[in-house]
Image (cartoon, helix red, strand yellow):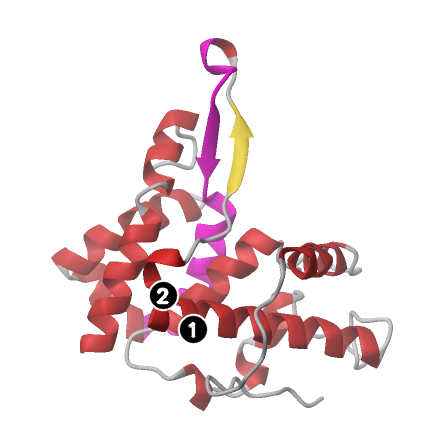
Amino acid sequence: MEYPHYNPASDNRPVSDEELEDLDELLAALPTDGALNIEALDGYLAGLLMTPGRNLADVPGAAWLPVVWGGDGEPEPAPFTSGKQRKKVMMLVLRHLHSIDWAWTNRPQAWEPIFSVADGEGEDEDLEFADAEDWAAGFLMAVDLAPEAWAPWFENGETAELLAPIAALGSPDGALAEGSMAARDEATRKIPDAMLALWALRKGA
């Protein structure tokens, strides 16, 4: 099975909100338990781009694309019903990846990650809480693909502090795995600025 490489110099147009919804529905409909939802995909792609010391354009697509749909089965191709469906998913993923890369490089303050939003309960029923659990879990899946590259960032004081909300929300045994909605919301709202700070550090390295 052939996979495209990521080309940051491509002139792909940004993915629209409607296309993101379409991609989310395509992934949800695949006959696999491992496909990412759109929040996890957004975090996963962010983690791939952020990986210290690595240019994603130099990484074969086969090393990271199958994670998006839960891996390829046997016999190939799987889990797609057609080559057309597989190509559509891959092209939408690559275009969204390019959108994140372009935003971080050219208009970082305009970048918005895709987080879940939940209604409050009890005394907080009139409030909405942001929750980056799925996004953070996707980000950590990218970390798992290059643990040696990430280890210094999780051990260094400055970068470890910036990554702390992601680890707390996205790890099954993270500090906020069972945290309150308010605590999860607070951690979630730290992530966008933390990501831009990490990106600045990465580009300046």
Secondary structure category for the residue under label 1: helix
**Quarter occupied by residue 147:** bottom left
Q: CA distance from mark 2 to mark 1?
A: 7 Å
Left/right of residue 123 with respect to residue 165 in the rendered view: right
Q: Which residue is the site of mark 2?
A: 107
Mark 2 Cα-neighbour bin, 10 Å: few <14, some 14–19, many ≥20: few
Q: Is residue 97 magenta?
A: no
Q: Which mark is residue 200?
A: none
- Residue 34 is at least partly visible in this image: yes
Residue bearing mark 1: 102
Magenta region, main secondary structure: helix
Outermost residue on the top side: it is 123
Q: Residue at x 47, y 44 (%)?
A: 133
- Relative to residue 202, is residue 111 depicted above or below? above
For residue 180, say whether it is visible. no
> Which residue corresponds to the image point at 46% horizontal and 9% vertical from the top-left?
123
- Which quadrant is home to the C terminus? bottom left
Q: Position of residue 58 (x, y in %)?
A: 44, 90
Q: Which amino acid type is marked by label 1?
A: Trp
Instruction: Please name whichever residue, 23 or 134, is drawn nearer the observer in this view of the structure.
Output: 23
Q: Residue at x 53, y 86 (%)?
A: 10
SS at badge 2: loop
The residue mark sitting in front, 2 or 1, is: 2
Q: Was residue 130 drawn as part of the magenta stretch in this picture?
A: yes
Q: Quadrant of the N terminus?
A: bottom right
Magenta span: 123-148
Q: Please give left or right for residue 150 compared with residue 18 in the image.
A: left
Q: Nearer the viewer, residue 194 or 65?
A: 194
Q: Are marks 2 and 1 in contact (CB under 8 Å)?
A: yes
- Asked whether, in this view, residue 78 is left or right of residue 181, the answer is right
Q: In the rendering, at what x and y percent does residue 152 appear? A: 21, 68
